[in-house]
Image (tube, grey):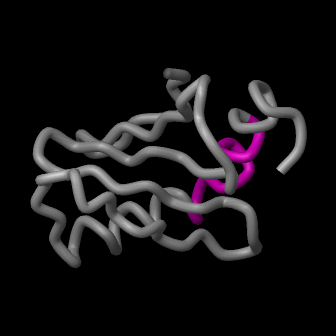
Amino acid sequence: MAFVFKQDGITVTVQTRDHRPPHVHVDSSNSSVKVDISSDLPKLMPVSKKKRVKITAAFERKALEMVADNLEACREAWRKYYGSL
């Protein structure tokens, strides 16, 4: 796992052995989402049915806002391990 940034107790990372589309993992102590960074605007990826994590609309909004504000840093972290978007 590669650390991208942390803000307000929420950590954004890129998994070093992961799958496409290009995305980051956004985690807090009680929520976790994946955010697709392949287009101009970040978007939430579907949540795995196996995951039993409570995700609130407020956390989803915060995750999207954080990634949008730091989109280039997220993309640079992805490119470091996978080359291109």
- Residue 80, placed above or below residue 55: above
Query: Start and end of the magenta stretch?
Result: 68-76
Nearest the eye: 50 or 57: 50
Q: Position of residue 84 (x, y in %)?
A: 89, 43
Residue 76 lies in what quarter of the image? top right
Q: Position of residue 3 (x, y in %)?
A: 51, 25
Nearest the eye: 12 or 52: 52
Picture residue at 50% right of the left edge, 60% below the top: 35
Q: Position of residue 27 (x, y in %)?
A: 30, 43
Picture residue at 25% right of the left edge, 61% below the top: 49
Q: Does 60 sit left or right of 12 as displayed?
A: left
Residue 41 lies in what quarter of the image? bottom right
- Farthest-out residue, front: 50
Picture residue at 49% right of the left edge, 34% below the top: 13
In the image, is residue 69 part of the stretch drawn in magenta? yes
- Residue 4, placed above or below residue 71: above
Q: Does 39 sit left or right of 68 as displayed?
A: right
In the image, is residue 70 part of the stretch drawn in magenta? yes
- Residue 68, placed above or below residue 16: below
Q: Position of residue 32 (x, y in %)?
A: 27, 50
